[in-house]
Image (tube, coloured by chain):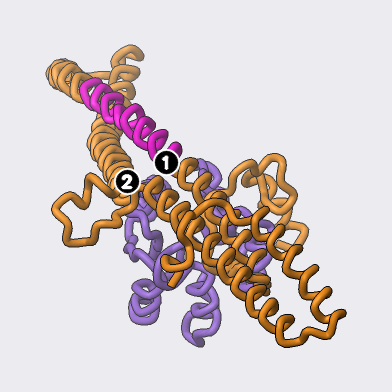
Chain colours: A orange, B purple
């Protein structure tokens, strides 16, 4: 329908106003002159002018909308397209974020594996050293029998051997923990990319909202916006800029203060 | 002492379990949201519940409310360990009957202090 009437596709605004003014003036003249049948014809011409400008504007907006959607680079080709991934920056962004979750998860687990492996080694060394320390003190106080001393002598040997191997193991684990933090560089780059995409999408969305506002203006549509109530019990995740916000606690001390003010 | 740790991220469950082990609590189980946790609590004879707030399925605050509404569980000590930091949320958790509230990120010392405080109050 729009195609048949919207031939030139130029901005209809000023033309529309001129035509409207001319037709309104001639309508008044005709009514004043008592030529009602001619006046009715002008009224129908007025309607046509309005429709035509509306169609032109809708046509223009449709093209802008297409442009905006293309700028999003979301998949407009269809889910079964073999080139889906090439067209879909959004799909790519969610893949990238999944990659971040995977990488951080892997790094956290690897770090915890190594920590859990090292902690018992550290406690074992500590326990054995404590026992040896007690025996060593007894030796220094000359409270030790020769047999006991010979046994301590051997134990000390074993301990020092073990200590060399175990501290080496702990050192290697610490070094691996260090290396497990290499995800930060990779995930940081990925997140920066996604952030710039989100910014781009936001700008295009703002454009779309402006266009929609214009359609409303032409068609005289008014929207009632319902205030959406947020369900607090759903949870919101970490809060940003907590230090400057009144409605958010900025740390455990704030939580403790708040709870104690509630009688905790 | 049997403890249930509820968090949707396995790494956080692992961190909490490690800290609990350091505090001498070795009998711990895990669940990844309220829907999994509630039946475990109802059949498992747990002495203590540590839960996150923001989880898919049943959230921590809903789990807390469900626990307080359950005749057999209503006195179970509950510690919330969560990134939720709005004052309104902390007040809501307090009103729902939480025994302690730790905001993430937290330290081992804070977790220890809050757990000890809860048990002190129960023992006294």
Residue A69 visible in the snapshot: yes
A183 magenta-colored: yes
What separation in Å lies between label 1 and label 2 (alpha carbons)? Answer: 8 Å
Q: What kind of element bears circle 1?
A: helix
Query: Which numbered circle lies on residue A197?
Result: 1
On the rendered image, what quadrant is the N terminus of chain B found in?
Answer: bottom left
Image coordinates of residue B110 in percent, x first then y, are 55, 45
Query: Dots 1 and 2: beta carbons under 8 Å?
Result: yes
Q: Earlier in the sequence, mark 1 or mark 2?
A: 2
Q: Does residue A54 appear left or right of residue A81 in this picture?
A: right
How crowded pointer 2 is (Cα within 10 Å; few <14, some 14-19, many 20+) is rated as some
User: What residue lies at 34% left-to-right and 47% top-to-bottom?
Assistant: A73
Q: Which residue is mark 2?
A: A89
Query: Which numbered circle lies on residue A135?
Result: none
User: What residue lies at 30% left-to-right and 51% top-to-bottom?
Assistant: A91
Q: Which residues are magenta?
A: A171-197
A149 magenta-colored: no
- The subunit letter for the residue under badge 1 reads A
Q: What kind of element bears circle 2?
A: helix
- The subunit letter for the residue under badge 2 reads A
How crowded pointer 1 is (Cα within 10 Å; few <14, some 14-19, many 20+) is rated as some
Q: Does residue A132 appear left or right of residue A35 in this picture?
A: left
Image coordinates of residue A165 in percent, x first then y, are 15, 20
To which quarter of the image does residue A57 belong? Answer: bottom right
């Amino acid at each position: 329908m729009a195609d048949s009437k919207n031939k030139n596709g130029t901005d209809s605004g000023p033309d529309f106003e001129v035509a409207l003014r001319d037709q309104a003036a001639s309508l008044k003249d005709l009514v004043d002159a008592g030529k009602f049948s001619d006046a009715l014809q002008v009224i129908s011409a007025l309607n046509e002018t309005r429709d035509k400008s509306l169609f032109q504007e809708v046509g223009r907006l449709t093209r802008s909308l297409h442009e905006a959607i293309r700028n999003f680079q979301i998949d407009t080709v269809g889910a079964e397209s073999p080139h889906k991934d090439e067209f879909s920056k959004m799909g790519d962004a969610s893949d990238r974020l999944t990659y971040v979750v995977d990488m951080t998860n892997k790094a956290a687990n690897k770090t915890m594996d190594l920590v859990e492996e090292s902690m018992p080694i550290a406690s074992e060394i500590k326990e054995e050293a404590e026992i040896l320390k007690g025996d060593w003190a007894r030796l220094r106080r000359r409270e030790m029998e020769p047999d006991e001393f010979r046994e301590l002598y051997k134990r000390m040997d074993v301990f020092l051997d073990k200590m060399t191997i175990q501290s080496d193991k702990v050192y290697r684990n610490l070094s691996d923990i260090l290396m497990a933090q290499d995800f930060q560089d990779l995930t940081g780059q990925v997140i920066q990319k996604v952030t710039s995409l989100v910014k781009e999408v936001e700008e295009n969305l703002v454009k779309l909202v402006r266009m929609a506002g214009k359609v409303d203006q032409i068609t005289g549509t008014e929207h009632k916006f319902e205030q959406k109530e947020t369900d607090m019990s759903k949870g919101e995740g970490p809060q940003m800029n907590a230090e400057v916000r009144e409605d958010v606690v900025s740390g455990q001390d704030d939580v403790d203060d708040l709870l104690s003010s509630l009688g905790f | 002492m049997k403890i249930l740790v509820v968090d949707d991220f396995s790494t956080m469950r692992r961190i909490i379990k490690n800290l609990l082990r350091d505090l001498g609590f070795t009998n711990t189980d895990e669940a990844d949201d309220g829907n999994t946790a509630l039946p475990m609590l109802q059949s498992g004879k747990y002495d203590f519940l540590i839960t996150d707030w923001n989880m898919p399925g049943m959230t921590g605050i809903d789990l807390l409310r469900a626990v307080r509404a359950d005749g057999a569980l209503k006195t179970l000590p509950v510690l919330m360990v969560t990134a939720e930091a709005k004052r309104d949320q902390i007040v809501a958790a307090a009103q729902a009957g939480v025994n302690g509230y730790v905001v993430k990120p937290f330290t081992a010392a804070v977790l220890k202090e809050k757990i000890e405080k809860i048990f002190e109050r129960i023992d006294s």
